[in-house]
Image (cartoon, rainbow, N blue to C red):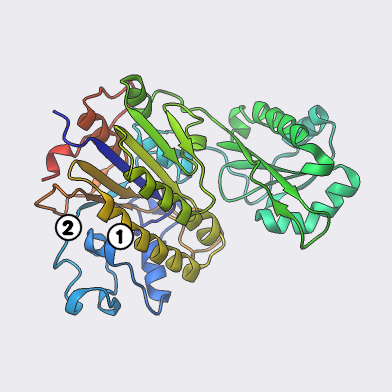
Amino acid sequence: MERFRRVFVVVVDSFGIGNAPDAAAFDDLGADTLGHIDERMESFRIPNMIRLGLADLHPIRAARDEALPENVSAAAALTGTRARLVEKSAGKDTMTGHWEMMGLHVTKPFQTFTEHGFPKELLDELSRRTGRVIIGNKAASGTEILDELGEEEIATGHMIVYTSADSVLQICGNEETFGLQELYRCCEIARELTMRDEWKVGRVIARPYVGKKKGEFKRTSNRHDYALKPYGKTVLDALKEAGFDVISIGKIRDIFDGEGITEAERSKSSVEGMDQTIAAAGRDFHGLCFVNLVDFDALWGHRRNPIGYGEELERFDEKLGILLDSLREDDLLMITADHGNDPTYKGTDHTREMVPLLVYSPSLTTPERLPDQDGFAVIGATVAENFGVKMPEGTFGKSLLEELK
């Protein structure tokens, strides 16, 4: 029998809570996204996440939090069931983490080209097929690469290709001089080339921009992601095929290349993503609302800014309070993350960490700490069991529905 009519899964992108058991294999020993943010914040006010049990999963200097009544211990008045999740898949990227949540075990990580750029053979073929000279070919932020090379691209017609710490190949194109359709054509060629195993990236991203000179360049909303499709059916497909709503907010649609999605909303920021989620809570849908909040990762984790990350968490927590008040008796909320991205760690890469699972419903009466869970797929399995749909063939995951009391 269906317990929850609506399930909200909110992914705080990159919100790790300390080393995964296999962190050494990823050269990530000592990484701790939450812990190192907490150390650097003079005042860190996240009372709603603490109320849901976050400080029971990872120590937080909660006595500084003025929102806690009478400075009681963080575990004194918990309202959420909670657990730490340990990723099974061989990776620490966005697509791997999200696909695993919905039941897929990724055994081969996607390629990244952060340290040395893309191989000459790939770029030579991309140049030949597009008819463009390639410039850039390094890891950089989107704004920095435009300031460095945007004027050259406009003057010469050359094509800016760059990457990041994620498994991505990104191509910039000025909408007036390069042309939007030409940018999309070049990205489609890049996507075709990067289907080869040795070059396989999770996403090829078209990054259109406007402006004529350094300091004035602005990226536009005409971005387009060319993502890999999941290699098998996921819980999202099972829900859609059974007639349930599957609403995606943020970049969820891109991560799954639209598979299993019935309705998609893009977000300009994590704050807007939470506003969209709160708006969805005011609607009468039947099924899953799946949310990704990317600013934590893109704006603060990769740019190694722990204070910015902490302040973003405070903004999220404020919106979370509104969402909690909007939930109905037969709603279920699950807050989690897809990987870590310790903003104090070496380099700019993601970090292999455990992630939190904070579970709340107004109808839960006995919230408790659950054992560490082997795999993010407990999320999809719980959603599937709740709605009475069968996990697709080839997926994994053990439902936690019976543990929610």
Q: Label 2: which residue? A: 79
Quick check: 375 left or right of 122?
left
Question: Residue shown at 53%/63% (left/top)?
Answer: 346
Q: Label 1: which residue? A: 321
- In the rendered image, residue 325, in percent from the top left (x then y), is placed at 26, 55
Mark 2 residue crowding within 10 angstroms, few (<14) / some (14–19) / many (20+): many
Identify residue type, mark 1: Gly
Locate residue 200: give its quadrant.
top right
- Dot placed on the residue nearer the N-terminal end, 1 or 2: 2
- On screen, residue 110 above or below 10: above
Secondary structure category for the residue under label 1: helix
Quick check: 84 left or right of 366?
right
Question: Residue shown at 73%/48% (left/top)?
Answer: 209
Report the Cα–Cα distance between label 1 and label 2: 13 Å
Locate residue 75: give its quadrant.
bottom left
Quick check: 324 left or right of 183?
left
- On screen, residue 12 above or below 285: below
Question: Residue shown at 17%/61% (left/top)?
Answer: 78
Identify residue type, mark 2: Thr
Mark 1 residue crowding within 10 angstroms, few (<14) / some (14–19) / many (20+): some
- In the rendered image, residue 295, in percent from the top left (x then y), is placed at 50, 55
Q: Nearer the viewer, residue 243 or 347?
A: 243
| Between marks 1 and 2 in the image, the one whose residue lies nearer the viewer | 1
Secondary structure category for the residue under label 2: loop
- In the rendered image, residue 354, in percent from the top left (x then y), is placed at 34, 52
